[in-house]
Image (tube, rainbow, N blue to C red):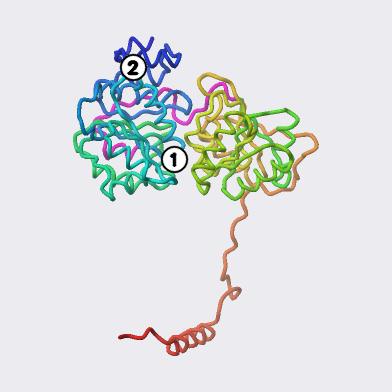
Amino acid sequence: MLFKDLGLSAALLKAIDKKGYSQPSPIQEKAIPQVLQGKDVLASAQTGTGKTAGFTLPLLHRLGESKAKKRPVRALILTPTRELAAQVYDNVKEYSEFLNVRSAVIFGGVNQNPQVDLLKKGVDVLVATPGRLIDLNNQGFLKLNQVETLVLDEADRMLDMGFLRDIKRILALLPVKRQNLLFSATFSKEIKKLAASFLNNPVLVEATPENTTAEKVDQLMYRVDTKQKQDVLINMITEGNWSQVLVFTRTKHRANRLAEKLNKSKVTAAAIHGNKSQGARTRALAGFKDSSVRVLVATDIAARGLDIPLLPYVINYELPNVPEDYVHRIGRTGRAGASGQAISLVAGDEVSYVKGIEKLLDQRFDFEIIEGYEPDPNAPTEKPKPQKRGRKNHGKRSSSNRNKNNSSRSNRNKNRKGPKRN
C-alpha cells in the first residue's frame, strides 16, 4: 500500500513526498483510515514504528484548511515530556507545510511569554505537556472548549510520571463531543482503565504484539560487578570506537556522575534528565545528534521522545526495575527497520530484574562474561531486604522511657513562647 491509497489530501501527500516517504508503516496503514473516519482509536505500536505520523496525518486531513479568523484550538496533542512535545510539533509543522494550519508547542522549563504570544495569535493544533497547559489555562491564556480531536501520546509514560490527575483535569476542560486517540508503546491495566474512561467505542489498532521488541535489535546481557561497570563501559566505547551511544541510568545523580567520569576519560558525554534546564537538554541532544557528543547518559523519563535516526547502541548501565521500561529503552535503537545493539550490564543484585524482563517478553537471556571483568561468584543475586526493627527488645524504647520523652516534650512545649497577638 502507498500513502496515496489512504485517502489523504493532495497537500499532505505533497509534504509526505517531500520527506521522502511513499509507503506507510504498519501502524500508519492500520490507524490512518480509522482516524480519517472520525473513530476513537486505541493504538499500540512499539517505539520507532511511526506512531506520530499515524495520528498527525489524518488529524491534519480532518482539520482541513482553517478559515476561522481567531483560530481556536481544534486539535490538542498531549505528551509526557518536553523532548517528545518538540518532536511531535516538528512533525506537525512538516506535514502541514502546504496547509493553512497554524500550530504551536508549549511546555515548562522555559519562559512562557513567547508561547503566550503564539496562543494570542490563534492556533489550530496545540502540542503540550500537561503541566504547562494547565498553568496557561489557569492564567486565562487559552481555551479548550472548541477542541475537536484529543491525542494522548505515550500515555503509559504519562501515568508513570504521575499525570493521571492532570489528564482528568484537562479532560474536564474539553467538549464532551470530540474524537479521542490514545497512542502508546505498551499497554498496562492502568492504561486500559484510562482508555475505557473517555474513549467511545474505540477501534483497537496493534502493529505488533504488546511489549515486544524490535526484531533487528541484538540484545546482550553481561554479568558485571557494580564497581566494574564504569571501566567496562569506557572500554567498550573506546575499544569499539563507538559513537552515538545512549546510556541509561536509574537516577539523575548517577547520570551526572557517569557523564563526568566519561568526560574525564576523554569520552565526550552529556547527561540529560528532568533536573536539567531546557537549554542544557537541547544542547546535549543537538551535540549527540551531530556526534560532537559521543555518549548521552539519560534517565527513563528524559529519554522518552528522543528521536535519533539510526541510533546504533543503547546500553543499560543500570537495568530498570520496571520491565516495561526495558522495552522503551531498547526501542531507541533498531528504529524504522534499522539494526541496533542493546547491551545490559547486570550486577548481581539486578538478576531479579532480568527475570522480570524475561517473563514480560517471554524470552530467555544467557549471561555473557567479559574476559578481565569476571564478576564475583559470591555476589548476592537479590536486593538486600531491609531488616525489621523492633524485634524483641532491640531498637525498642521501654514504656518508662517513652513516658519520660513525652513528658520532656510536653514541658518544652509549655516553655515555648508563642507569637504575640495585637
- What type is the residue that disc 2 sits on? Leu
Circle 1: element type: loop
Label 1 near label 2: C-beta < 8 Å?
A: no
Circle 2: element type: helix
Residue 81 circle label: 1
> Residue 112, percent across and down?
38, 45
Residue 190 visible, this orientation? no
Instruction: Pick the residue in front: 240 or 142.
Output: 142
Q: Mark 2 = which residue?
A: 12
Instruction: Pick the residue in front: 393 or 98.
Output: 98
Q: What's the magenta region?
A: 192-217
Q: Quadrant of residue 155?
A: top left
Q: Quadrant of residue 178?
A: top left
Is 214 included in the stretch rendered in magenta?
yes
Mark 2 / mark 1, whichever is N-terminal = 2
Residue at (42% x, 89% y) in the render: 414
- What type is the residue that disc 1 sits on? Thr
Residue 329 visible, this orientation? yes
